[in-house]
Amino acid sequence: MSEPRLEYRVRFPQPQTHRYRVTLALDGLAPGEHRIEMAVWTPGSYLVREFSRHVHGLRAADGDGRPVACDKVSKNAWRFLAPDSGAARIEYEVYANEPTVQTSHLDASHAYWNGAGMFFALDGRTDLPVDVVVETPPGWRVSTALETVEEGEGWVRLRAPDHDALLDSPVEVGTHRVYRFEALGRPHELALYGHGNEDPERLVADLARIVETAGAMFGGLPYDRYVFIVHLLDGRGGGLEHAASTTCDVGRFDFRPEGRYLSLLTLFSHEYFHLWNVKRIHPAALGPFDYGRENYTTLLWAMEGVTDYYAQLLLVRAGLWSVRKYAQMLASDIREYEARPGRRVQSAAEASFDTWIKFYRPDEDSPNRTISYYTKGMLIGLCLDLEIRRRTGGGRGLDDVLRRMYERYGRRGTGFPEGAYRQAAEEVAGGSLEAFWRRYVEGTEDLDPGEFLAHAGLLLRRRVARSDRDGDPANRPPGAGREEEPGAEGAPRPLLGMVPEERSGRLYVRHVLAETPAEEAGVNAYDEVIAVGGFRVEDADGLRARIHDHRPGEVVRLTLARRGELVAVDVPLSEAPPDRYEIDVRADVGEEERAVYRAWLGQDLPEPGSLRAEPASPRRPFAASIV
Ligand SMILES: [Zn+2]
């Protein structure tokens, strides 16, 4: 029996209308009923997005263009009867005006699509190869991980070996710049769309370092060619991982100043590292995928958080980040984790499982009841790594766990059972990690990274920074210390317990934090903040300044507008938690700690004081936004 053949043709004669015209030509159909179905989500982004809501005007015809009955049978599926010839044409339009990595975008400047929102699976047959013919406007080129098998004037024929590869290979079409480079003997491409303050030569050199460093960890590269699609946009950044490519949306002016660029590099190293961790090493729930519904796993902390951990670690190992920079970012992430009341409610395993309805659908209560499996998972990765290194005298670490998982499952392309991750970690550690898992992965006990950083001779310091209220530093008596001096404590700061938000020139309460004065006194999310102590406040800085005029224990009257009605709430201020997190080198370090540090970061432990730095501007600025 012959297999059906699928060929898509993608056209966009009027790109400014954001409408793709797609034709799916089917040949060799067996007699009888057939079904086409579109994905409701895209792997790597765990939210049901209902891509088919952008599909319009779908109709079917036979090979000669005569209409064939085609019924819509669910939100994302259609059914039709095969014509006698075994050939059918399905035509439809996809509206694409959402410039994110998970969706599709089309305008006069370029065409970008994520296959999940463009293409159908036929009869659930994800094993069939698929051709995609892209009709290109004059001067436009195509960048994708899919193989180009043929091209002519104004068209390119791409081939996906199967449905998964079709959906896993985003396509960029336009006048974008293409930079080719080789790393570890494999060709790589940077497809750069948009303009800003970018430095493509430097980016290419840094991407090559990331490729070499990650490739060295796994003993080579598991692809023939890799494509970085990078969009320079003005919105929020983000990336999506694929087996042989990634799409990264970045701020067009994120390439300067230096600190901003160095932080940007974590996006590329994160998405790139995913080609092992989640694209190849993944729980059984994450491949083969069920594209029609939620796919559940308790291990997103290991897929996303551990990838975040390596995103930074790789930059240190590649020499792109100093250890000082790393210590600064780590301290900032630890503060972020400790600022969320939800860490005592939701475990990393639960956060992973419920991502579909919680992490991807945050609301005003989220900080109180949920954690980020990125931040917590990153800290679990760090602590697990240091714990294994302590137990093995630095000899083995998380690298070995991932290599083991890759050899055992990833290389063979099979998903692993949920328990296999801990099992591999225990094999490498040479003993039980039951307590670690129970407390920090499945439980909500406070994970103190300082306890684990000590294994590598480091010290985590939390304190309240000196404020203006402590007086002019120049006017302090000698010996009172400067801001940067380790251990220099400021006066206690007051805490209200809410996160403000400025919107349309007004100031609102975005979050009320659990077990804080604001919650107990009855401040509500969505309240508009009018005044503090009878004085008008205009913005978040003004609110902060008025609150910081008080001391913990004092009562302030907030004037709020709630659904149009003025409300006065008296709030007795409490004491704010430490806001200055720092990692330093311990003074009393033994040979064991030095060995762990060396094995972990690939260099010698520096002198005490050498890692201290100004606080980084946080990647996730929740902690700093609390008043
Ligand atoms: Zn990720």
Image (cartoon, rainbow, N blue to C red):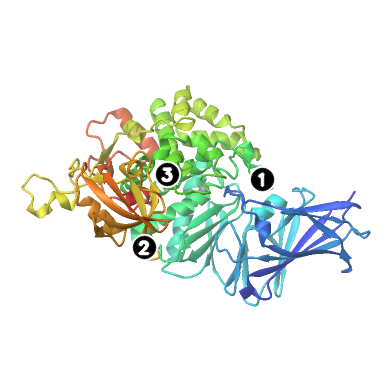
> Is residue 440 in view?
yes
- Kindly indicate whether the residue at mark 3 contacts the one at mark 2 (C-beta within 8 angstroms): no
Give, as a three-letter code, the residue at label 3: Pro
Whole-angstrom CA distance, mark 1 to mark 2, is: 40 Å
Q: Residue at x 57, y 54 (%)?
A: 186
Q: Position of residue 272 (x, y in %)?
A: 52, 50
Foreground residue among 368 and 163? 368
Assess disc 1: are there few (<14), some (14-19) or many (≥20) residues with their C-alpha within 10 Å of its C-alpha. Answer: few
Query: Secondary structure under badge 3?
Result: helix
Whole-angstrom CA distance, mark 1 to mark 3, is: 26 Å
Q: Position of residue 147 (x, y in %)?
A: 68, 59
Badge nearest the viewer, 1 or 2:
2
Badge nearest the viewer, 2 or 3:
2
Q: Position of residue 83 (x, y in %)?
A: 91, 59
- Residue for badge 3: 367
Q: Is residue 575 above or below residue 37?
A: above
Give, as a three-letter code, the residue at label 1: Arg
Q: Is residue 560 above or below residue 611?
A: below
Foreground residue among 601 and 302? 302
Task: Please report whichever mark, 1 or 3, sits nearer to the chain's N-terminal start.
Answer: 1
- Residue for badge 2: 506
- Residue for badge 1: 293
Q: How many marks?
A: 3
Task: Please report whichever mark, 2 or 3, sits nearer to the chain's N-terminal start.
Answer: 3
Badge nearest the viewer, 1 or 3:
3
Give, as a three-letter code, the residue at label 2: Arg
Foreground residue among 125 and 400? 125
Marking on residue 492 = none
